[in-house]
Image (cartoon, helix red, strand yellow):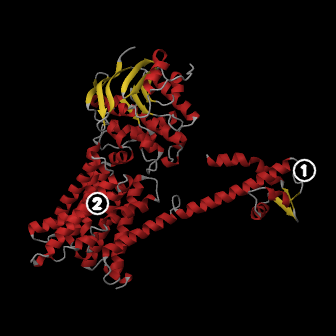
Amino acid sequence: MDLQEYFSLVFTDYTLRTITLGTAILGAVCGMLGSFAVLRKQSLLGDAISHAALPGIAIAFLITGAKDSNVLLIGALVSGLIGTFWIRGIISRTHLKSDTALGLILSIFFGFGMLLLTFIQKQPNANQAGLDKYLFGQAATLVESDVWLMAIVTGACLIVLLLFWKEFKILLFDADYTKTLGFNTKFIDILITVFIVLAIVLGLQTVGVVLMSAMLLAPAAAARQWTNSLGVMVFLAALFGAFAGVFGTAVSASQNNLSTGPVIVIVAGVFVLFSFIFSPSRGLLFKQIRFIKNRRDLQLHKTLAFMYHIAETHDDITHPHAVKILNNFQGFTRGTLQKLVTKNYVILIGNQWSLTQEGFKTAANLYNQQTSNNE
Amino acid sequence: MGKIAVKVDDLTVAYNYKPVLWDIDLEIPEGVLMAIVGPNGAGKSTLIKSILGILKPIAGSVSIYGKSYEKQRSLVAYVPQKGSVDWDFPTTALDVVMMGTYGSLGWIKRPKQKEKKAALEALEKVGMLAFKHRQISQLSGGQQQRIFLARALVQNASIYFMDEPFQGVDATTEIAIINILKELRKAGKTVIVVHHDLQTVPEYFDWVTFLNVKKIATGPVKDIFNDDNLTKTYGINYKVSIQE
């Protein structure tokens, strides 16, 4: 199947449609919530939560003996939440910094989860095969009820976001100040965190424990490059996330047996890379271009100003001078002289340059211009 | 002096074992422009944060016009240290100032035209109206400080707490800010400022509190701002010539 075939089949084929919808919704909700995680500088929290969810999945299986994905996800939710609150507890009760707390919980919970998984695999239970899909995710196992669950959580998340938008925004920007205004910051904080945990748990089946944090961070990091408005950022992150989901599914479906989760993450990564380079205001490319252009302009202006000071000493401002004089001036290059000539600021006759009326006037106003441009 | 605006009783605060504030008793009369001075680590910011309920004290109580802070919240505005937030946050100057209206709005309700108008007026008062749509990271340090001040002005409070509003601002901004603070005092408001520059205390403030974990002294600048108290607070023999 090639990409074209995929897009013609996506609306009619049940499996493709389910998977595509699922990954799109997942991408959207992760993008939205990821924006908050990124702005709170809790990017790694997602990684810790997803890893912390693994033992929950294993324990849920051990208790019920069934592979019903909803039951396993409840297990993941519980252990993800426990992990999250332990992280917060470690940060607030010990001298350890948040990166240490995140690293500790991530690796200990994940280690415990892996231990349980290997234990389960040794069990004489035919049912145990396939639990390892939660490690790297397997979008192909998504069924309609999974997608419905994602849609419901996303809907709830949207409603909460719209209702508490103002509270989320002010908490993200200035938590102490929010407290003095009388808002229960703990409640807002827990609300955001619980939704982040929910989104992560929902994504485990599709993207897996190991890669889940990229779903959260990549769309948000990409979106941040394009806007200076929180609302637009959250919207763009949702859009990027959904697109990454759809494209990732399309690519993995059209290239035989490429695992969907990693492809989605790679697509999201491409978005990030593209945004880092090409965003007009924050992107590296335009930043560099602006930097070079500014330098050139400044060099040009400095050369012109140098000439102006020489010409100033003569009654006739167009009095010709030898190019050699300019060699004493540091900012000078032959290129800048040529540019000044094409701008009609300077006339070059042989080895003699002279300022034009226009060049003189421009040079006289240079400093004023420079400062007014910066305002 | 008239009523007592802020009263602190036996306040003790500790982060770990060592107390940051020890047994502070403080009465701030209504209508003063007060500086809190003291060396680094003296607990100046901690004192403000404890009064505002951001930090939980180990012991002691705080009252605003005779009632608990929770009941009098609407009378109090806070200007945190500029460095306490991430200025790269995706939002505009106007948006930050609007946050000052969130408290009176309460949960869920969104700011409307009325709140926007109040925010624009506050921006004008601090001379930042032209920058209302500017992304906050593109403002200079002084401009950011003015935005924070405007956000507190929007709250239309009776008591203002400010944590080092002059830190890292240029002379023009400093004068602009102090003029606004003096106007607030003229309007009968109480303004409490954590301040670092001892030279400007007599010129800017009429009331001062010396703090170094314990309260050293509090009262009118003209009575208690002297070498004796400075030495007690800063521990070294303070012989700066502080001119009126």
| Label 1 packing within 10 angstroms: few (<14), some (14-19), many (20+) | few
- In which chain is the residue bearing label 2? A
B183 or A159, which is in the foreground? B183
The answer to whether residue B24 is above or below residue A323 is above
Q: Position of residue B21 (x, y in %)?
A: 33, 30
Residue at the (52%, 21%) spot, across then down? B202
- Residue A316: which disc? 1
Mark 2, residue position: A48
Asked if residue A333 shows in the view, the reply is yes
Q: Position of residue B226 (x, y in %)?
A: 49, 18
A100 or B52, which is in the foreground? A100
Q: Position of residue A74 (x, y in %)?
A: 17, 62
- In which chain is the residue bearing label 1? A
> Dot 1: what SS?
loop
Amino acid bearing label 2: Ala
What's the distance in space between the residues labelled 2 and 1, CA to CA?
A: 75 Å
- Residue A123: which disc? none
